[in-house]
Amino acid sequence: MNNRGAIPEAERVRRELRDALEAAGVMLPSLGLDPLSCTGPNPRPLIDLGRCDMATARGLTVLLREHREWGRGMER
């Protein structure tokens, strides 16, 4: 992917993550693209997970513990 397509691709990934989290009952209200990472002639967008309250953090913790195999063998 060239960098011209990086921002639209990052936005698609952000939407997919939001949808997957919501389907699991977790909402990250501040989920978005980091604006500074999207600037300049060669943007490298970062997805900002944002802030969440303790209930949301607990929900994420439960979700991750239930799916420990997620990180095993995954390409990074």
Image (cartoon, rainbow, N blue to C red):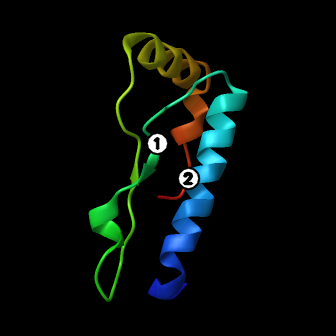
Measure the C-alpha gap from mark 1 to mark 2.
7 Å
Residue 57, by quadrant, is top left
Q: Which residue is mark 2?
A: 14
> In percent of the image, x 49 and y 86: which residue is there?
4
Q: Nearer the viewer, residue 64 or 42?
A: 42
Q: Is residue 36 left or right of residue 33?
A: left
Q: Nearer the viewer, residue 10 or 29?
A: 29
User: Judging from the image, what secondary structure is the residue with disc 2 in?
Assistant: helix
Mark 2 is surrounded, within 10 Å at the Cα level, by few (under 14), some (14 to 19) or many (20 or more) other residues, namely some
Q: Position of residue 9 (x, y in %)?
A: 58, 70
Q: Nearer the viewer, residue 27 or 2?
A: 27
Q: Which residue is mark 1?
A: 31
Q: Position of residue 30 (x, y in %)?
A: 42, 38
Query: Three-letter amino acid code at disc 2?
Result: Arg
> In percent of the image, x 36 and y 73: which residue is there?
44
Q: Position of residue 66 (x, y in %)?
A: 61, 19
